[in-house]
Image (cartoon, rainbow, N blue to C red):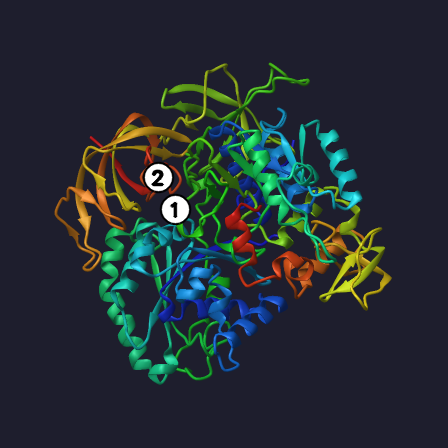
Amino acid sequence: MTLDLLRISTSGSVEDGKSTLIGRLLYDSKSILQDQLDHVAQASLRRGGEGALDLALLTDGLRAEREQGITIDVAYRYFATPRRRFIIADCPGHQQYTRNMVTGASTADLAVVLIDARHGVIEQSKRHAFISALLGIPKLVVAVNKMDLVEHSQARFEEIAQEFERFAPILRRDGQRAGQHHEIIYIPMSALNGDNVVDRSTTMDWYQGPSLLELLEQVEVAYDHPYEKPARFPVQWVIRPSAGERAGEYRGYAGQLASGALRQGDEVTILPGGERTRILAIDSFDGELDEAVAPMSIAIRLQDQLDISRGELISHCEQEPVVARELDADVCWMAQKPLRLGARYVVKHTTRSATAVVDAIDDLLNVHTLERDAPASQLSLNDIGRVRLRTSTPLVLDPYKTNRRTGSFILIDEASNETVGAGMIKAAGA
Amino acid sequence: MIAAAPPQLSHLRALESEAIHVMREVAAEFEAPVLLFSGGKDSIVLLRLAEKAFRPAPFPFPLMHVDTGHNFPEVIEFRDRLVAELGERLIVASVQESIDSGRVTEETGPRASRNQLQTVTLLDAISEHSFDAAFGGARRDEERARAKERVFSFRNDFGQWDPKKQRPELWNLYNGHISKGEHVRVFPLSNWTELDVWEYIHQEQLEVPTIYFAHERQVFARDGMLYAWREGTELIDGETVFSETVRYRTVGDMSCTGGVCSQAVTLQEVVAEIATTRVTERGETRADDRVTEAAMEDRKKAGYF
């Protein structure tokens, strides 16, 4: 059975009915098993529900979340239909947990942003949509929920869609794949009653589009087609047996192909050094391969004896990535202690770690207006800004909008060991 | 030579590649990793993934089993055979030794279990060997506290998990920075479901302990589950021992792992059974999760697997 995998991120606050939506998706697609349901039924009763299942109790997994009735951290949920496998990253909506939202959004193919039909497009919905676009999620579903509380009004739905469209140019401005795939789809629904979640609504016959699940099953996943992307292979680990029959003789460069395809015999460049050689063989545990495509994990043997180690990158000789020690990036700051001019951090980019110094903060995103404001001297928790970094050793990179894997990095605080920043590369510096 | 791979990987191949990537990151960034091996299906998959990640070289880490002394004998026999076939090193950390040395006190009574005690033995062993990363086979679909956990799950110097202070984890960039005395639990199978695990075992034709297949066994019913009866088991009033055809969905301590009625005797039949089940594996077979609404979260905070 070969099913493809769709990774979805959902964001919105509990008040928007996000957990209820996910609960409904799992419940109506029969992905909740009997003991989980019993559990929810008991807990709903204990919490004073009047027999109705509180589906939000399915997703809020931590004690503190159930106590406070909010989502604090990302929860991952898994379900399958006969057409597809799904991973849902259920993200918190509150601004103070933006960093957890970014975590969930970083690997998604599609984002669902929830809007309460009564309240329309509020600041939080805009921020969710913006972060999804910034992280390069190619498809955005705007789920206009709680339609039952606005008398299933078509006029209200269209009003909200128009309001959202007015703000869409900002998404295109900052969307990493601007103009290319970025697509916004609007669905009116009532998660509480199950309208347009799995089954089409009978109360909103003015809406002719698909239910959310129908859409999720049919939407074309924006796979980066391996034959249309340049090959990028960051060396992760060198396999050199010290014992056994191939001891001293075998040397395989192991890693996960970040993008593109590599074939046996291809002429390749090793970066940042620039040495050239050919691929002698592509090994997997199951045997030698003629060809490998992203995102396979493989081991490569090269024709020439070169001294290559973790952190170097193998690419074709044409369409090489950029080698740079200076770069511009959008950085989402995730620590209490602010990012400051001149500060040093560990940057982890592909399989390479280096020291990075903050040379400039060029602008700061205003989370209220989503405009880019004047240069700042620091980024505080949950701020997003354009930052110029200089690194101790060269990085082998592409812009994030052309390659999510070679265009992203994290910043680590050397003193606390915490992950403090997430970066999306705009360009190599001058 | 294998024919050219299709441009799009199947979901199992995508999950496999992600897990191999995680294992190689750990090998590259930590001084002293260890792989926690229980003989159960998830850790059997981990061993195959380790072969895929590191062969033809030996694994860059030893295996470790936390032995409660209450394991199914079939599983111990299987464990030793598999480790010998792989030619890798196995460390056995014994709960019995923790009891004998007074580190933990054994529970008593008919519901006594060594499940809680394992945490102390595990943390002692991690500290004794100075391990800084420990691979586990836990999956996010198992339980709702696990649904929240990162792939690299940070543990402080007491081995504890703080669910409110997890490190952000973006893309496939994992932060392996820790201070001395701390460690990271690493879960390469985070995004796998129980069905994925069985489909993978079927695809790879992996051998698993015989208790995963339907067999006849002496059991008794308690709290809606069928427990294996063995010499010395204390029965509660009204419980009787009878013979039933069962298989196990999880491999844990005999004292807290229940069997399920099943006729599945081949991998294909097991896959078919899991695909249509209406109950989760932990709900159906694990007494240890039934204590409170947050039983797993509490145990994880204390340093459990």
Residue A14 pos. (x, y %): 38, 68
Q: Mark 2 lies on which chain?
A: A
Query: Which residue appears at 81% of the width and 69% of the height?
Result: B238
Residue at screen point 41% across, 45% down: B169
Q: Which of marks 2 and 1 is in front?
A: 1
Mark number displayed over residue A141: none
Q: Is residue A314 above or below residue A418?
A: above
Q: Mark 2 points at which residue?
A: A410
Amino acid at the residue labelled 1: Pro
Between A325 and A68, the one lying in front of the other is A68
A107 is higher (above) or lower (below) than B1 = below
Residue found 60% across the figure and 20% down from its top: A241
User: What's the CA distance linking mark 2 and mark 1?
Assistant: 10 Å
In the picture as drawn, the residue positioned furthest to the front comes out as B102
Crowding at label 1, few (<14), some or many (≥20) Cα neighbours within 10 Å? many
Kind of residue sitting beneath label 2: Ile
Give the image location of residue A321, x and y in percent.
Answer: 35, 31
CB-based contact (under 8 Å), mark 2 and mark 1: yes
Of the pair A222 and A340, the residue shown nearer to us: A340
Q: Nearer the viewer, residue A303 or A295?
A: A295
Q: Residue B253 location, x and y as percent?
A: 71, 49
* Residue bearing the label numbered 1: B168
Mark 1 falls within which chain?
Answer: B
Res. A170 visible in picture: yes
